[in-house]
Amino acid sequence: MGTILKIDHIKKYYGNKSCLTKAISDISLEVQKKEFVAIMGSSGSGKTTLLNLVSTIDKVTAGSIVVNGTEITKLKGNKLNKFRRDELGFVFQDFNLLDTLTAYENIALALSIQKVKPDIIKERIAEISGILGITEILPKYPYQLSGGQKQRVAAARAIINKPSLILADEPTGALDSKSAAMLLSQFRELNEKNDATILMVTHDAFSASYANRVIFIKDGEVFHEINRGNDKRNVFFNKIIDVIALLGGDVSDVI
Amino acid sequence: MLFKLSYKNIKSGIKDYVVYFMTLALGVSMFYLFNSLDSQSAIMKMNASSFNLIETLMSVINILSYFISVIFGCLIIYASRFLIRRRKNEFGIYLTLGMSKKQVSFILVGENLLIGLFSLVVGLLVGIFGSYFVSGLVAGLFEADMTKFEFVLSKHAIIKTMICFGIIFLVDIVFHVFQIGRYKLIDMLYENRKSESIKIKRIWPSIIVFMLSIIVLGIAYHIALVDCFSDSFTSNIEIKLLVAIILGCVGTLMFFWSVAGFALRILIHKSNIYYRNLNSFSYRQLSYQINTNVVAMSIICILLFVTLCITATGFSLKQDLSNKARKIMPFDIEISNSTLREGQQNVDDLLNDEVNKNDKEYKDIIKKDSKKRQKKYAFQRLGIKEKINKLDSKYFDNVKEYAIVRPISWVDNRGPLEINTKSLSSDPNYKLAERNDNRYSFSLFKNIYKQSEYNKLAKITESRQVSVKNDEYVVLFYSGKENYQKAVLDEVELNKIPICGIEVTPKYKHIQYGRVTTENSLADSSGAIIVSDEMYAKLYKAIAKRNEDFINNAINEINSKKTDEEKQNYLERLGNSGKYYIVENNGSPSYEVLVGNYKANSTDVKRKIDRAFTDKFQDKLEMMTGFRIVNLRTTMLDESVSIGVIVVFVGFYIGGGCLIVSVALLALKELANNTDSIGRYDVLRRIGADEKMINASLFKQGFIFFMMPLVIALIHCIFGIEFSNKIFVASNSNLNMCTVLVVFAWIIVIYVTYFIVTYLNSKRIIKRK
């Protein structure tokens, strides 16, 4: 198993000398291939900043991030876009689907900007939509879909180009619990059957319990990490809850 | 403090205001330019020659100005509504900070005032400098001899512009203060978060409507180009054209309603194109944009059509008028008395004398009057040249060359040429006088010309020369109505005809194309029969003899009556029977035309001679002899130039106004749309589309959005211009394609400028995060 993501002593500061905010003071971590990693932390812990840095939306102040052998902190311009296109897949809390396009076209767009041929696009979408159970809703527009369906379409869009790393930012944040559970089990399935590597940011223990490994962040530093090992999901969930209690999160963070 | 905020807002947001500002400034400069026309030296110069050109032009422009300011007012309100909508959030923040709505309004008023003032100043400057160039253009276009350009500043135009746009700004400000007052704080703050649910049209109805729209447009074109001209010029061409226009508008509306869906359907099938880069996004976005702006796009398209047609045909019409004036006036002056039958007067006198010869009182009067009468007769018998010389002996000093024709007019019970013209009568406009025997005849052909006289005149008027021998005759005919002329030339067969007992034979089997004088005179519409000099003399003698016989006969009749009453009755009956008419040519040929060229070459000198003529003795000449000036080259040129000036300026004013309004509307729609789509572009960036792709998509969308109404308008215009062309052809002129293209090029320059500005602005809008 190779390393997909290697984060090495990164720092991210905002502001100037007189008023410095350390969003990330020092974080190092690695994600292996075929891993499903959740990053947890309360708001302000730096987890979103971390995701932004990995997704190249933001730049590090110091340190290095290597994704699939590429040092991304040095990338610029079109290379950066190409990297984002080819190596990363995104799932956002608010779906970020284009409301003027059908579900099919939304998914296809991720491939067509990579200049993939229409025939191959068709094949790939058929394959992915089968896995995510969205074949029926492909010709529909986002406004005709439920939140869960939207998020599955977004997930399909994220993984359609077989990225080396899927970044998910609170993917269940806007879903009801049933849709959330469905989505997460599909994430798991993708991880197990399709060998997708997923890095998910969440503040929700339930979501995190679907992952193989959970990394806790507090005040811009890695606070703790736990492996699921062979635990059942509910056991793992309890372990996570324990850590959260240690973390000093309040009850609202737990459920 | 608040004003400072306004100033800073504008300074930082200046780029948002570009389209707004550009439109305002263009509007102001156009307004100034047209309203200052009367003080431009080129036009002033023209006025020296052209009657009340300026008054007419300026009164038309004045009316148009009101119309245009109302339209601009609406546009400006729309434009700043868009700007406010973009900044609702900002105003919301001001309100949460504790400002009152009044203060927020004050900021807005300040901003509007600054932008308004700025664009007013810039627009006026552009207008003033623009008018300088327009002066040159005008001088070139309208053949005004401009020796020097003067820099003029029209105070009244500046004031008028300021007042008009001042009112527009004021209305705009009031409207916005009202608007701000109506907003709720929550809407202002959360405007951006409200996700609008978009509805996407079903595709099948689009396809059906699209087909229908093509059919409707086809019918409209067909009506305009074929039906309107089908049975020559029938009277209801206006109604047909109106139907065509209405159908055209409906078709355009249907087209824009359905085109997006239809095109999308096709594109989706072409997956190689549709699923390339951001194409699927671009097309969907575009179709959404078109579908939500159906009415606006149709209106824009129709406005553009109006712009294109008016400017193109107006300009061509002007060009055409000048060319025509030059072509049909190859000589300086034409004088004729074709309208007065003075011969009759003599017969009248003669017969009256006979009737009343026993009346002593009458005799006394006659005796007293006889010297005067003799003088009158003598004067009447003189040729036109002598007559003019009597009035102004120096007049002919100015004339380099001249020619006179004195056709004998011969009208018997029937004209000399009686032709079965039933075939020509299908056209109701040209139905000829109906005769009892159910035949139509050309009583029109009644003027018999002497060959040598005619040829001399033809040389000056640059018409065709004719040669006839012995008893031959040639008939020339010309009509402004082409189809009528064609029918006459082709369908009428000529035979031997007796004129006053003398038979003449046709040289050609058909009537020939040819004209004696210019369009304005009566001579032409009646055609011309040309015979050899000898035959002319013979006919003249015969007719004179016949007339004499007629009079002698009448005198005998009178003498045979016993009572005065009977005599009087006879005379009255004779008068009523119209038989005097036949005797018209007693004495000298009463119908004369003189054409001549002046020695002078410059138009100004010619104009002076003409002025002197018209001012001094035109009235006297007409009163005493019935001769009047039919055409003066200078007058004709001036007239056509004036009409041309008015047509072109009015055309440009309306056309320019429509163009700016429609293109500004397009730009605003596009900007508003892109503002609404900021979020979508962010999504594109997140899924890895690079800026190049996004910009390309933006460009493509804008380009198609801008081009669509223009292309449709151009297609409409092809048919519209074809229509005008047909009208022009019918009136024997033509549309100058070169000028049409030049006008189109200018329109496209303005169009493209707006497009580029909009594109750059949109790029900025979607980048902002």
Image (cartoon, coloured by chain):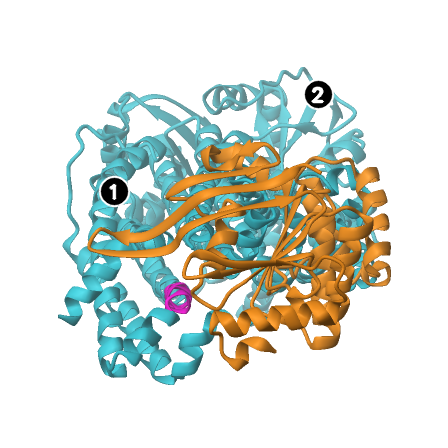
User: Start and end of the magenta stretch?
Assistant: B76-87
**Quadrant (top left, top right, bottom left, bottom right) of the C terminus of chain B:** bottom left
Which residue type carries mark 1? Ser
Q: Is residue B250 left or right of residue B207?
A: left
Subunit under mark 1: B
Q: Colour of chain B?
A: cyan
Q: Is residue A53 left or right of residue B725?
A: left
Q: Which residue is mark 1?
A: B131
Above or below: residue B627 compared with residue B93: above
Q: Which residue is mark 2?
A: B471
Subunit under mark 2: B
Q: Colour of chain A?
A: orange
Q: Residue at x 34, y 84 (%)?
A: B181
Which residue type carries mark 2? Asp
Q: Residue at x 40, y 76 (%)?
A: B188
- Which dot marks residue B57? none
